[in-house]
Amino acid sequence: MPVADKIKNSLERSSWIRQMFEAGARLRAEKGAENVFDFSLGNPNVPPPEAFYQVMARLAVDRTPGLHGYMPNAGIPAVREKLACFLSREFAQSFTLDDVIMTVGAGGALNIILKTILNPEEEIIVPMPYFVEYDVYLDNHGGKVCRVASNQDFSLNLENIAGAINEKTAGVLINTPNNPTGVVYSEAQLRALGAMLEEQGRKWGRALYLISDEPYRDIIYGPQAVANIFSCYQNTIVATSFSKNLSLPGERIGYVAVHPQIADKKMLIAGMIMANRVLGYVNAPAIMQLAVAELLQEKTDIAQYSRKRDLMCAVLDEAGFAYTKPGGAFYVFPPSPLSDDVAFAKAAMEENIILVPGSGFMGPGHFRLAYCCSDETIINSLPAFKRLRVKYS
């Protein structure tokens, strides 16, 4: 056997996102890129802010000795200090550099969190639908995913979450704004979730962690805002990155931030720093740490995503698809006209539409559209969506 059974099984059920993206690449080669409407991959197409290029140009010629050398495993202290000051202003808490760990993207952040807090067979509760990689991250560290259904509008169902907590529960993992639904959890819901976790923690005699995956925090539409999660619950850990708000997914730069009053903070932080090292991430790249430290007030042009959302919704409206209007991120998650969403995704390919079946996000009966693509792709897809809807009306 050339590979381990676990890897072989993972390859056989590999991410639907990547499968559909690769199918789109084949279709573009066959039909021509202008004739294919690819909504598969959440790869930001709005460029980074101009300040990013200015900062990178300056860092590229900086010959300060040691600039690219080894550093503490938590990251460059001066960078963490700047980030702590930013977080203190943003969340009205007194963060210090010891509350922040620089990581290789949000994926690296989630992995060091889970490695630190999980004993074998312990569970993390995850509301469905959710980003499919969570399953793999939990399995990496001997944990189990405990899936719970959300409400019909994709908001949190607190009764389901509370009912899933048991002696093996280590915490709850949420993602807001959410991938794949675009839902933004309200402050009222998050405060209620925090109060429930506080009560359940007393019941089970352990701190239950609330892990909030927030790479889309700044991609938000309308008057609403993403709630201050740190004000909702003390035992909160945030994992995030600069992939979406600065359009830097390929740079793999992110961080972990813990509530300044979190339980057993000293040991928790020490554990995550060690996990950063032993998992092989070691440090987020030095030059990107230095860059983002100067870009904390910058964002890519969020108005472009707002326009793309409205264009995507207009296409779905005219074609006759139902959906829950996304409040953030750059995804919409309509119900599939076919109960078999995989079959629907294959039917969509016949119209040169590349979408991702909801089953890939533990949301069967739906499909995900990533509208972080060109305006032309969205607008020109309307006739294809109309034909697709007529087939399954």
Image (cartoon, grey):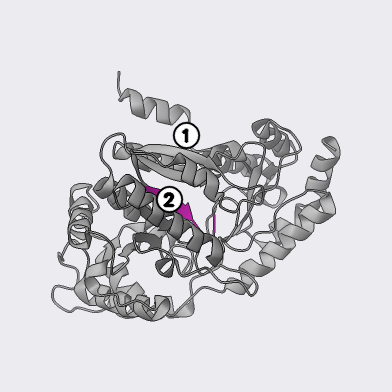
Q: Hey, which residue is sitting farthest front in the picture? A: 203
Q: Provide the residue designation for mark 1.
A: 14
**Picture quadrant where residue 223 is located:** bottom right
| Number of other residues with Cα within 10 Å of mark 2, as a class: few under 14, some 14 to 19, many 20 or more | many
Q: Secondary structure at mark 2?
A: strand
Image quadrant containing the C terminus: top right
Q: Provide the residue designation for mark 2.
A: 173
Using residue 15 as the reference point, say whether residue 303 is left or right of it: right
Residue 1's place in the image compared with 372, above or below, is above
Q: Earlier in the sequence, mark 1 or mark 2?
A: 1
Query: Magenta stretch?
Result: 171-178
Would you say residue 313 sits in the magenta stretch? no
Q: Residue at x 32, y 53 (%)?
A: 108
Amino acid type shown at disc 2: Leu
Q: Position of residue 343 (x, y in %)?
A: 68, 30
Q: Residue at x 31, y 57 (%)?
A: 104
| Number of other residues with Cα within 10 Å of mark 1, as a class: few under 14, some 14 to 19, many 20 or more | some
Mark 1 vs mark 2, CA separation in Å? 22 Å
